[in-house]
Amino acid sequence: MFVTAADYIWKKNMRLISLLLLLSSLVIGNTVLAADEEEAEPLKTAYYSLSPSVVSNLQEHKKYIRCDVQLMTKGDENAAKIEKHAAALRHEMLLLLGDQKSSDLKTPKGKEGLRKSALGALQKVIEELEGDKTIIKDLYFTSFFVQ
């Protein structure tokens, strides 16, 4: 079989074109992946303060608690949802605090138990109102005073 110069040049150009197409698809594919990674940036942690301080009577006569509560969430949209329902969340917090005994709250174990109870209670409230209990990721006491 006889190969002409035109056939040889055609085959060589086709290999070059195929190689260029392959390289360009790799470059474009990596660019698209990089853009997707930038768009899928993780949500930033945000904190919402239930302010002013939460103050409530305790079960015992003439005993009370004052605490500052910070709610952790992810993203500004979730922080806005928490702010929207702040009254309901404060209400739930007051009910929970009013059901406590001062002797239980004076130990680290008692404070941590209250923190976990409060987190669960507030997650339940936000789930009823927004349909998603994971909006509130965590709850922190930034001040805690029992007298």
Image: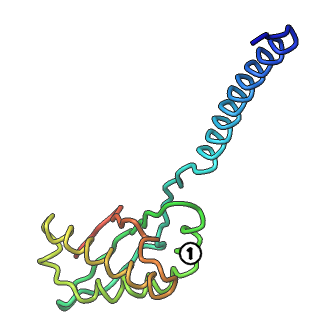
Residue placed furthest toward the right: 6
Residue at 33% from the left image edge and 84% from the top image edge: 56
Quarter of the N terminus within the rendering: top right
**Residue 7 at x, y percent in the picture:** 83, 15
Residue at 26% from the left image edge and 82% from the top image edge: 64
User: Is 106 or 34 nearer to us in this picture?
Assistant: 34
**Residue 48 at x, y percent in the picture:** 49, 66
Residue placed furthest toward the front: 1
Left/right placement of residue 99 relative to residue 16 reads: left
Q: Which residue is mark 1?
A: 81
Q: Quadrant of residue 143?
A: bottom left
Left/right placement of residue 26 relative to residue 89 reads: right
Residue placed furthest toward the top: 5
Left/right placement of residue 144 relative to residue 25 reads: left
Residue at 73% from the left image edge and 20% from the top image edge: 15
**Residue 73 at x, y percent in the picture:** 47, 64
Quarter of the C terminus within the rendering: bottom left
Residue at 26% from the left image edge and 72% from the top image edge: 116
Q: Quadrant of residue 102?
A: bottom left
> Which kind of residue does numbered mark 1 sit on?
Lys
**Residue 30 at x, y percent in the picture:** 63, 35
SS assignment at label 1: helix
